[in-house]
Amino acid sequence: GFEADLTNTKSPLEGMLRDIIEVLIAWAELMSGVSPQSSFLTRFRCVVNLHVNAGPITAEEKDSNARMVDKRLLSRESAMAANGVEDVASEAERISSDPGAKLVEATAQGDAIKSLIDAGAGVEQAAKLIGMTDEEARLFGSSSFSEPPVDQ
């Protein structure tokens, strides 16, 4: 019942906090003397997303969150918040800066590029498809890859 009460107040509280933040931005804009054409509020979108936390979650709920991330039904950051991580941004940064995580990501990118090339994509096109910037893809595509020697 306690969690249901918390969940029922989530949306109204998010709306109220969003309104307060937007009022503060508008107030700062008014005090700065910026013209209405370059309004802060037209460049920013306030998003408030409260996470109801009624206490520790079960191991099954954590497993469910992990499966939803694997199936791309839930973002990694949302799953971390649901699992009780308080500073999600810092935790995500620590995970991505871990050398092991970088190796896993590089391996996944390499596998994806190989699969795309095997399916007929060019190297540069494959690099763009996995999320490289145009410049990164151009540099990657211009790299010389040597084929292993073929025994004759």
Image (cartoon, helix red, strand yellow):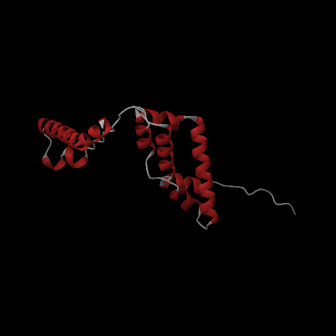
| Residue at image point 62% right, 54% down | 111
Looking at the image, residue 137 sits to the left or right of residue 12; the answer is right
Looking at the image, residue 88 sits to the left or right of residue 138; the answer is left
Q: Residue furthest bottom?
A: 120
Closer to us: 21 or 129: 21
Closer to us: 17 or 150: 17
Residue 33 horizontal/vertical position (percent): 12, 39
Picture layout, residue 141 above or below residue 105? below
Residue 61 in view here: yes
| Residue at image point 26% right, 41% down | 10
| Residue at image point 24% right, 40% down | 9
Residue 142 in view here: no
Residue 11 horizontal/vertical position (percent): 24, 44
Residue 8 horizontal/vertical position (percent): 25, 42
| Image quarter in which the N terminus is found | top left
Q: Residue furthest right?
A: 152
| Residue at image point 46% right, 33% down | 91
Residue 51 horizontal/vertical position (percent): 34, 38
In which image quadrant can residue 22 be found? top left
